[in-house]
Structure formats: C-alpha cells, structure tokens
Amino acid sequence: MTTGGARSNMTAGVIFLAMTALSAALLAGFFGSFHPALDSFSHFRIHLAVLMALCALPLLATSFRAQAAMAIVFAVAALATTADALPRPWPIQAAARPADRIVYRLLQMNLRYDNPTPKKVLSLIGRTNPDVITLEEVSAMWATELGYINSAYPYRILCPYPNGFFGVALLSRRPFAAGTEPRCERRGAMATATVDFGGIGVEVAAIHLSWPWPREQYWQIGEISETLSSLGETAIMAGDCNAVPWSAAVRRVASLSGLTVMPSAGPSWIYIGLPDFLRRFAGLPIDQVFSKGAVTIRSAVRLEGTGSDHLPVLVEFSLGVEEKKPVDEHETATASLHRTTRSRG
C-alpha cells in the first residue's frame, strides 16, 4: 500500500469515528425521558444530524459507504422530527385569521439581565403594541426601564429570582380579571395572572427554566409542577424554556400543565459571543409558547434583535369561545320530520 493510500485510509477511519460518535450522541437524545443527561443531547439534534451527514458524505466513496448511507438516512429521519423548528424565512401560520373574532398579540422576550440597549426593547414594544408581554431575566435595571411604559401597561407583576438577575415578569394593557390576583412562583420561575380579554378570563403565564442537566432544569420542573397543574382551563404560557420543543423537558412541562406546545417560530438563541446573524439559522429554538382551552394560536414570528442573546417572538392568538344558539324545539321537530320524509322517499 502506498503512503498516499495509507493516509487516505487513516483519514477515512478518523471521519468514520467522528460520524459514529455523532450518531451515538444523536441517538441518545431520543431517550431523554429515561434520564435528563440523555435529554441534554436532544437539544442539539439538528446540529448533530447535520454534522453527522457532512461526515458521512465523503465516506460514500470509501469502504465505509454502507455505514455512511445508513448515517445519512438516520440524519434525515432525525431532522424530520424537528421540521417545525428548522430555520425558515417566513412566519409560522398556525391557523387562518378569523373574520369574526378579535386577534390578540403576545410578545415573548428574554430581555437579558445586562442588555446594553434597553431603549431598543421599549421601542419594539411600542411598535408592536402587544396586548400582553412575557419577560425573562428581569434584573433590577429592567425594573427601572419597564417603569417608563407603566402608563401603557399598568397591569403587571414582576417576580424576582433569588440571585436578582433572572426574574420573570408579565405586563398587560388589559386589566386582570376581577376578583383575581397575579401570582409569583416562590423561586421566581413563573408569573401568572388571569387577564380579562373582552370579558373572557385567560390565564397568562411567563416561565423561565434553568439550563438542562447537569444544571437544575429537571428538578426545577418538578418544583413548579403544582403551579403548572393549577393553570386554568383556558391559558397561554410563554417563556425561555432553555429546552427545544421536541425535548423530554418541554413534553414534561406540557403534560404537567395540560398545555399544547406551539409549532416553533424557529431558532431564537445563540451564545452572545457569536455573530448575531447566526442566531436565526444556527441557534436553538428554546423560546416556547403553550396554550390550551379556548386559545387558538394564529401565527408566530421572530422579530429583530434588541440586544439580548434571544430573539423576541410575537404571537397572534384568538379566543375560540363560541356562543351556542338555544335549541328551537319547533325547528328541531320540523327538521326531524323533513329527514324522515326524505328517508321514506
């Protein structure tokens, strides 16, 4: 064997080992419900699948071609499970806009506790004019900045986190339902309030979960399980879950609360030290919106950055409560007679 051939085989062997390691990590993420350590791999499913496929491509021309072909098939199958969250240039249109119902807006934002451009945040709020806003990483600085829009959003609750940096908040320009009080989860991971949307009470919640294993995300979900399960029959919850929509963590939150997670608007977070333009295409979709009951999600779109390592997500929703017409006994009897006549004919 020539020196060039030996070098080529060695290179192929190294690439094969890398592909195998990536496939093992990718596979581990599908078993996240067994242990939070495995679930940590699931958050990088898209990245692992793409890297594995890239490793497999050059191996198609080597003796590892069969394994490479299997890896590509596995990568495509894995990506199919994340289709809702793959980067896209258009907003998610979940349901057609109703002609007979009001469409409301919810703005979800992780502010970042040390955001150097808070005025960009306030400007975005003014331009989008949401009905309710869910916020995370509400530091003392943000408590001051949010005071400037107190007249526009007079109904609010700020829930401090023990370390003073990562509290959550809920702001509304619609009143809280009469006879109800907004509430903070004891460690500041959730804020909830029943908001009056034209006479319909909707429980709105802001949530901020910790990082996945080996950090305390798994145990934190257990700690807030009572708060999650106590959400009303009609509710919408948004926040920075630090978990992707297909993860065991998000599925667990949805199961505990009886909520359905909305199709992702796309990648919303990336490490603050990386270029901003990568966030939309190579980031993680960890800002989630959940709903249940009469809430129908209409659309979701990521907005421009405002100095945080997260992109804001603007969600449009309507309330699907329909009035049932009283039964007209005469009309019902007549309709029954017509059906009987037709059947005899």
Image (cartoon, rainbow, N blue to C red):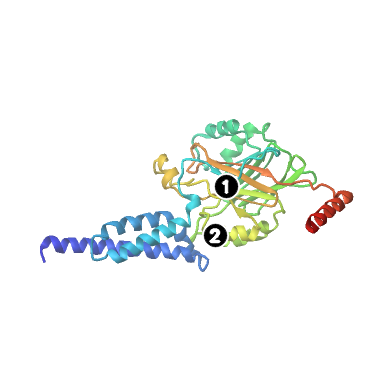
Residue 322, x across and y down, in percent: 75, 46
Q: Nearer the viewer, residue 327 or 40?
A: 327
Rendering quarter of residue 223: bottom right
Q: Is residue 247 found left or right of 193 in the rendered image?
A: left
Residue at x 27%, y 60% (from the top left corner): 60
Q: Nearer the viewer, residue 191 or 313?
A: 313
Residue 332, x across and y down, in percent: 85, 52
Q: Quadrant of the N terminus?
A: bottom left
Rendering quarter of residue 339: bottom right
Q: Nearer the viewer, residue 15 or 103?
A: 103
Q: Nearer the viewer, residue 119 or 243?
A: 243
Front label number (2 vs 1):
2
As shown in the figure, which amino acid type bears the numbered disc 2? Ala
Q: Disc 2 vs disc 1: Cβ atoms closer than 8 Å?
A: no
- Mark 2, secondary structure of its residue: helix
| Label 1: few (<14), some (14–19) or many (≥20) C-alpha neighbours in 10 Å | some
As shown in the figure, which amino acid type bears the numbered disc 1? Gly
Residue at x 62%, y 31% (from the top left corner): 148
Residue at x 88%, y 51% (from the top left corner): 329
As drawn, the residue found furthest toward the left would be 2
As drawn, the residue found furthest toward the front would be 345
Vertical arrangement, residue 68 with respect to residue 96, above or below: below
- Identify the residue under disc 1: 164
Residue 324 at least partly seen: yes
Rendering quarter of residue 3: bottom left
Residue 37 at least partly seen: no
Q: Is residue 336 found left or right of 127 in the rendered image?
A: right
- Identify the residue under disc 2: 249
Residue 334, x across and y down, in percent: 86, 51
Residue 108, x across and y down, in percent: 58, 43
As drawn, the residue found furthest toward the bottom would be 34
